[in-house]
Image (cartoon, rainbow, N blue to C red):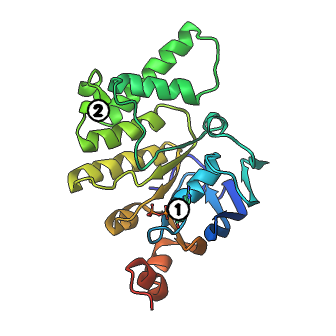
Amino acid sequence: MVSSQVDTQEVLMEIRNVDRAFGGVKAVDNVSMDLRAGIITTLVGPNGAGKTTLFNLITGELSKDSGTIKWLGQPINRIKPFQAARAGILRTFQDLRLFNEMSVEDNILTSIEANSVPLPMAKSQRKARREKVEYALSRTGLIDKRHIRAKDLAYAERKFLSMARVMATDARLWLLDEPASGLDPNSYEKFLEILREEVKQGVTVCIIEHNLDIVIGISDRIAFLDRGKLLADDEPQTVLNDPDLRAIYFGERT
Ligand SMILES: Nc1ncnc2c1ncn2[C@@H]1O[C@H](COP(=O)(O)OP(=O)(O)OP(=O)(O)O)[C@@H](O)[C@H]1O
């Protein structure tokens, strides 16, 4: 599933000594890691490990207490979510945050409009937007649902719409927060297939995932967080075969 189109040694994002506490809880504790281009990095760890907080720090939903994050070599320490999106870093949320009263198609269009650098709407740009919407609709299997309101979709379709909203932008880094949770096996196979295809086209993905089958099926690299600390960042087999990490993952720590 590694991209054939990009240099996977290229570091897109450099995270160094990042901290964030909530009162006495160190949600993210001195985390340093790289996100490399054209691969899928999976963030795993028990509940409360700090995975979502790390996403929030990357995209500026939360501010860091200390540490630095660089994107394409440039510090993005005070970035706001809309600036992150326009810089090519886009995320999904566990609670999806769709516009429930809007149609599927309008949800995708809105995402393009909100997350792209505004340009005068030349005819050619309008056409390009339409093509992106069509691409996202067809890749996620939502083409026949384009006029349905988001709130009337089935659960799996809502998950795919959330992904379509990222897909239709030109984001280079996708941060996906449990995008496959609650999906039936058919849907998550489809989800994995879509993701692999997008990575082949050059997208870079960091995904938070609990389902071990999905973690095994998709990861090029696994970063393991526990109580805010990064305990491992390595090849999947190395992380998954580590008995101490397995004990933490399966809640068997002493
Ligand atoms: N806004 C907040 N206010 C107070 N504490 C928070 C806040 N956000 C996160 N925390 C705490 O920070 C820690 C890390 O939470 P976080 O949601 O990042 O973990 P997670 O690994 O994403 O967990 P899960 O797998 O359950 O989603 C937890 O102890 C959580 O209670």
| For residue 230, side relative to residue 194 (left or right) | right
Confirm if mark 2 falls within 8 A of ligand 1.
no
Residue 72 higher or lower than 23, as above or below: above
| For residue 212, side relative to residue 125 (left or right) | left
Asked which secondary structure carries label 1, the reply is helix
Question: Residue under circle 1?
Answer: 51
Residue 132 visible from this viewpoint: no
Residue drawn at the location 29% of the way across and 32% of the way down: 151
Q: Quadrant of the C terminus?
A: bottom left
Confirm if mark 1 falls within 8 A of ligand 1.
yes
Residue 100 higher or lower than 206, as above or below: above
Q: Nearer the viewer, residue 181 or 223?
A: 181
Query: Callout 1, which amino acid?
Result: Lys
Q: Could you tell me residue 74's position as x and y percent?
A: 78, 47
Q: Could you tell me residue 48's position as x and y percent?
A: 49, 67
Q: Could you tell me residue 71's position as x and y percent?
A: 70, 48
Residue drawn at the location 28% of the way across and 35% of the way down: 141
Mark 2 closeness class: few <14, some 14–19, many ≥20 residues within 10 Å: some
Q: Which mark is residue 151?
A: 2
